[in-house]
Image: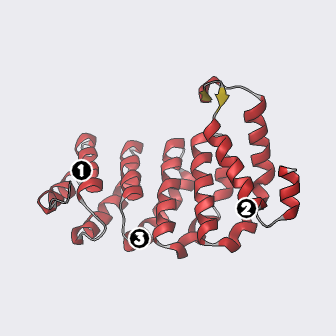
């Protein structure tokens, strides 16, 4: 907005996200992420509406709420909404909802590092997912956790065999679904290699296993 005051549109955004129609909610949440900032006093008024939308039977509405939470939230909002985000990571049957929930969890722990333990136990089932989007998001979450809590690195070493198998499959087989210029999902390959690099740092056993 080039520094212009956006107060004029904030209440309208809050009204739109309370509407039942998806098209109106979509515009409201888009405005929420663009016209608000985390110092906006009225932002907290959106917390309850986001909580309701996170439990909606409509996955598209849940997706909007998660996307907004990933873009803009205060520490207080993170503390209040983290349980709902965790439930979606565990229970949602839609892979794109799980992916967005992981991204929201990443935002939450950046804002409130002490909430890392809220999501730590949910990562194992995420790593076992075959969906590449979920795996990419999960590896980003793991990387953030290690940056915030370096002592937690040992908790993720158990994922090395599963990710080694995944990387081997990407390198030795071809999938048109994830093809990028003849390479099977190079983005996931890079993220897995970054994970191995992090695990191998200051660990001679893992370093020799993967890099020599």
Spatial CA distance of label 2 from label 1 is: 39 Å
Identify the image quadrant of residue 95: top right
- Asked whether 89 or 197 is in front, the reply is 197
**With respect to residue 93, does 76 lie above or below?**
below
Q: Position of residue 6 (x, y in %)?
A: 16, 59
- Which residue is farthest left? 8
Q: Position of residue 144 (x, y in %)?
A: 58, 63
Where residue 28 is drawn, which disc sits there?
A: 1
Where residue 156 is drawn, which disc sits there?
A: 2
Instruction: Name the side, left or right, on which 60 lies relative to 24.
Output: right
Q: Quadrant of the N terminus?
A: bottom left
**With respect to residue 61, does 144 lie above or below?**
below
Of label 2 and label 3, which has the lower sequence position? 3
* Mark toward the viewer: 3 or 1: 1
Q: Position of residue 189 (x, y in %)?
A: 68, 41
Where residue 80 is drawn, which disc sits there?
A: 3
């Amino acid at each position: 907005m080039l520094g212009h005051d956006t107060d004029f549109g904030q209440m309208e955004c809050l009204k739109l996200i309370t509407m039942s129609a998806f098209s109106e909610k979509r515009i409201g949440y888009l405005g929420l992420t663009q016209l608000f900032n985390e110092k906006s006093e009225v932002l907290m008024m959106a917390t309850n509406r986001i909580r309701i939308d996170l439990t909606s039977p409509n996955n598209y509405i849940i997706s909007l709420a998660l996307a907004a939470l990933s873009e803009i939230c205060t520490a207080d909002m993170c503390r209040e909404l983290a349980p709902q985000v965790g439930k979606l990571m565990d229970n949602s049957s839609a892979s794109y909802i799980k992916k967005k929930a992981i991204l929201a969890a990443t935002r939450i722990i950046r804002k409130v590092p002490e909430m890392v333990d809220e999501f730590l136990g949910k990562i194992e089932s995420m790593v076992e997912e075959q969906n590449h989007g979920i795996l990419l998001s999960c590896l980003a979450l793991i990387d953030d956790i290690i940056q915030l809590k370096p002592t937690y690195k040992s908790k993720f070493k158990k994922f090395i065999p599963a990710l080694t198998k995944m990387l081997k499959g990407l390198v030795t087989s071809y999938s048109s679904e994830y093809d990028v210029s003849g390479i099977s999902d190079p983005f996931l390959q890079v993220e897995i290699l970054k994970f191995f690099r992090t695990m191998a740092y200051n660990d001679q056993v893992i370093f020799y296993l993967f890099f020599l």
